[in-house]
Image (cartoon, rainbow, N blue to C red):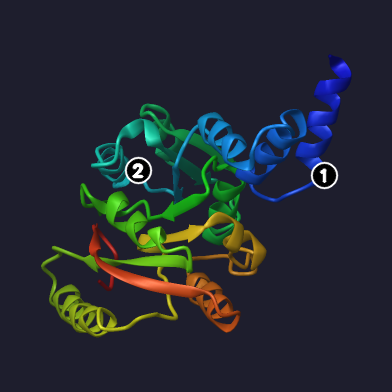
Amino acid sequence: MSVVFYLAGWIFTQYETTIAERVKSVMLFFYGGLSTNVCAHLMTDMLKYKYSIIVPVYNGEQTLSRCLLALEQQSVARQLYEIIVVDDGSTDQSAEIARQLSVTCYHQKNSGPAAARNKGVELAGAELIFFTDADCIVNRDWLEQMALPFTKSEVTAVKGAYRTEQRSIVARFCQLEFAERFKMLSRCVSIDMVDTYSAAFRRKKFQTVGGFDTAFPVANNEDTELSYRMAAQGHLMVFNPNAVVQHLNHPDS
């Protein structure tokens, strides 16, 4: 029996990059006499989650609780998705807040949001991965709407819409600009930019292109760089205006 488990472990570590493919390899190894469809069904049963939501946070104690509570109350059944908080070396109560809720919390040395998001993908147990920010509150149907375009196999990434209720004059003018931009994007078959306030990817494709560039030490266009890299490689990215997040305290939005 120990030899069997050793061989299974070897398959798991030597081949395939995604969890689903690794599990499928093991299933095919042990149940080679079964059809691929049966193995795929068994594999689906073994996978714990259908969706993984990743939230990087750095000193976000003022907004993190509201962000996570909204994510826990999605229209999608809670058992189908996990929430992973990557605490990027916070010096406030962010990690403690996350640990009080039904989420996975991982702490790392401060390395920037690009590295935090990549770590979240490493920890994720689903094939579809979703990102939002710690100062965002998603609508109740956000996950459902973000997942919807992936029913088309050619879609690699999805971007949602952004709204704010901030009353400052700068925030209100920025929202007008966003609204006009979203109106134009709604008419596009594909887009070339997926912002991390509301982003989703097929995990394998995300990892194939290398994920976020960790050379970006702070939140400053690391999502733009990844998006342009994906677009240059021909990946289809789309916009769903019905997947809405509210940004709580962005200084310029």
Element under label 2? loop
Q: Please name whichever residue, 23 or 134, is drawn nearer the observer in this view of the structure.
A: 23
Element under label 1? helix
Residue 54 drawn at (x, y percent): 46, 48
Residue highlighted by disc 2: 61
Residue 40 found in image quarter: top right
Q: Earlier in the sequence, mark 1 or mark 2?
A: 1
Q: Which mark is residue 14?
A: 1
Residue drawn where x is 21% and y is 79% of the image:
174
Q: Which mark is residue 122?
A: none
Image height of 251 relative to 103, above or below? below
User: How many residues crowd around disc 1 within 10 Å: few (fewer than 14), some, or many (20 or more)?
Assistant: few
Q: Is residue 181 left or right of residue 25?
A: left
Q: Please name whichever residue, 188 or 53, is drawn nearer the observer in this view of the structure.
A: 188
Q: Please name whichever residue, 165 or 128, is drawn nearer the observer in this view of the structure.
A: 128
Residue drawn where x is 13% and y is 77% of the image:
169
**Type of the residue with mark 2:** Glu
Image height of 28 relative to 111, above or below? above
**Type of the residue with mark 1:** Gln
Residue 165 drawn at (x, y percent): 13, 63
Q: Quadrant of the N terminus?
A: top right
Is residue 91 visible in the rendered image? The answer is no
Image height of 181 relative to 163, above or below? below
